[in-house]
Image (cartoon, grey):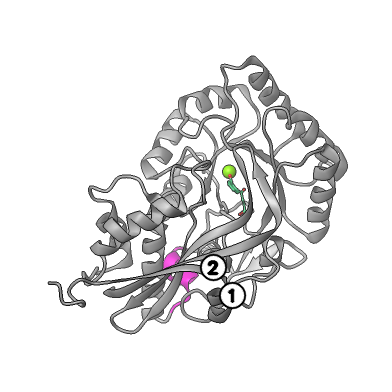
Amino acid sequence: MIRLDRITLREIHLALKEPFRISSGVQSERRIMLLELQDADGASVWAECVAFETPNYTPETIDTARLAIREWLAPRLLGQPVERAADVHARLATNIRGHAMAKAALEMGCWAVEAVQRGRPLSRHLGGDRPGLRDAVPTGISLGLQATPQALVDRAQAAVAAGYQKVKLKIEPGRDVAFVRAVREAVGPAIELMADANAAYSLEDPAHHAALKELDAFELLMLEQPLGADELLGLATLQAELRTALCLDESITDRSRAKAMLALQSGRIINIKPGRVGGFTESLAIHDLCAAASPVVPVWCGGMLESGIGRAYNVALASLPNFSLPGDLSPSARYWARDVVVPAWTMNADGLVPVPTTTPGLGVEVDTDFIESLTSHTETLESRSVAGVG
Ligand code: OSB
Ligand code: MG
């Protein structure tokens, strides 16, 4: 039973080591919403809302998420017990459309509360009795758009030397074929390489269409979200023209979109970001749907430039068996001079991030003093009944 009696929302500002540019915008600093969920039984967990500052990746922002949590979502949990974490998604989703990242922050936090209550590591609580849960997750790096092919080559070579199992290159029209070619030539045929367009291309533009077809020559592991953020039909058209597997990111907002993708053959791989799909229950449903597909649709865990708190949730999710491709789960040092958890997330020379499997809950300590020093805003939400309002 999960009975939240207090939720503290906190905004922190964390400077990225290097600006991260995708086709739709650039970030130099992450404004991150962290949540502390206090259960009536005493369990307390940290969670992260992954929404960005601007609506260039999905419609949500950190500010819309704060509003949604404060006004509509938190009141559905505070002082109102939920039997199981698996029931939280329905509690939050009924008659509230959208706001997936706001919902996910609370929902995933409830999974962690339940893991703590049962004395289980989050990974093992989430995986349940599924066979083949991982002890370490294969990890890739996502490289932002660069000014020149050589700048991208330098970063890709450093990533290969560091042991990453996959290198993902952000692309956009005009920074695509020459950049991918340069990296493929520099790293050789054995390296798992992929490109992510973040919805920047249109099949109606002949130059875009030609560039996408040219990318088919570089033996990419996959091409992520080449077309519009809510595309499915156009992606099916494109997939039929390419050898390269398409991977869907923005287009998969919940399990029904994943079902539609499978039916339409809009792609062959899904990037699951739990925030984008509204939390762990939807993530598990998509994972299981893809594992049951014929042929199997592999999934991998995407990233939102999370702090070490969000990373704990992603690593737990990526320990599930059908997360068979390397995720965007880079170690803390790829993003931050100092992370908000101890120990920081690390990757070994084989590109594996260990999954915490001994301590209950997230498996990392939260550095509350450091978080305090980064905090620009806090807000405490309490159950109306606790506050005596009825
Ligand atoms: O499409 O996966 C994406 C970052 C910002 C916006 C969109 C995306 C990304 C990434 C980051 O690729 C991956 C990471 O967190 O390392
Ligand atoms: Mg993507």
Q: How far across and down, in percent of the image, does residue 262 sit? A: 45, 35
The quadrant in which residue 257 appears is: top left
User: Residue pushed farthest bottom?
Assistant: 42
Q: Amino acid at mark 1?
A: Val
Of residues 74 and 295, the one nearer the viewer is 74
Q: Is label 1 within 8 A of ligand 1 (CB to nearest ligand atom)?
A: no
Of residues 323 and 279, the one nearer the viewer is 279
Q: How far across and down, in percent of the image, does residue 223 sit? A: 63, 36
Relative to 112, 373 lies left or right: right
Q: How far across and down, in percent of the image, does residue 12 sit? A: 53, 66
Identify the residue position indicated by label 1 in the image: 341
Q: Is label 2 within 8 A of ligand 1 (CB to nearest ligand atom)?
A: no
Secondary structure of the residue carrying tag 2 is: helix
First in sequence: mark 2 vs mark 1: 2
User: Residue pushed farthest front?
Assistant: 376
Of residues 228 and 346, the one nearer the viewer is 228
Q: Amino acid at mark 2?
A: Ala
Please report the bounds of the magenta region as a residue range: 120-130
Of residues 346 and 324, the one nearer the viewer is 346
Give above or below for 9 relative to 69.
below
